[in-house]
Image: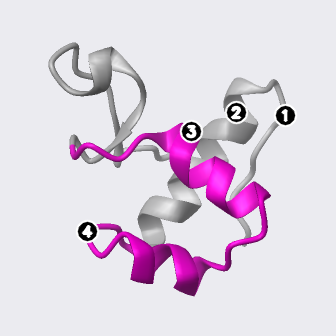
Amino acid sequence: MKLDRITFDPNTLGGKAAIRGIRISVSLVVNLAANGMTRQEILEAYPDLEDDDITQALKYAAWTSGDMVTEAA
């Protein structure tokens, strides 16, 4: 699984999983999606994000929860 947009840096968000090293955490993106925001709404609220960032944040969350994520053919 490709998760090249998920980064960990002790100097950014205290080492929490972040999107591309910017100060937007994976948990924030997942929380927004889980609470009903559409991808478009998330992208409008956080213009530094890209659609692939949201996809990888959700894949990372599924992976860390123990669910398997597979790529569509």
- Three-letter amino acid code at disc 1? Asp
SS for callout 2 = helix
Q: Secondary structure at mark 1?
A: loop
Q: Residues within 10 Å of mark 2 (few under 14, many from 20)?
A: some
The reply to whether the C-beta atoms of the residues labelled 3 and 4 are less than 8 Å apart is no
Q: CA distance from mark 4 to mark 1?
A: 28 Å
Q: Earlier in the sequence, mark 1 or mark 3?
A: 3
- Assign the N terminus to one quadrant of the image: top right
Mark 3 is on which residue type?
Ser
* Rendered location of residue 71, percent (x, y): 69, 59
| Number of numbered discs | 4
Q: Which residues are magenta?
A: 22-50
* Residue for badge 3: 27
x, y (%) of residue 52?
45, 68
> For the residues marked 4 and 2, what is the alpha-carbon distance in whole angstroms?
24 Å
Kindly report the distance in space between the C-alpha atoms of the residues bearing marks 3 and 2: 13 Å
Of residues 49 and 66, the one nearer the viewer is: 49
Which disc is residue 63 wearing?
2
- Dot 3 crowding, Cα within 10 Å, few <14, some 14–19, many 20+: some
- Asked if the residues shown at circle 3 and circle 2 are in contact, with their CB atoms under 8 angstroms apart, the answer is no
Dot 4 or dot 1: first in sequence order is 4
Residue that mark 4 sits on: 48
Taking the image as shown, residue 53 lies to the left or right of residue 4, namely right
Mark-to-mark CA distance, 1 and 3 = 16 Å
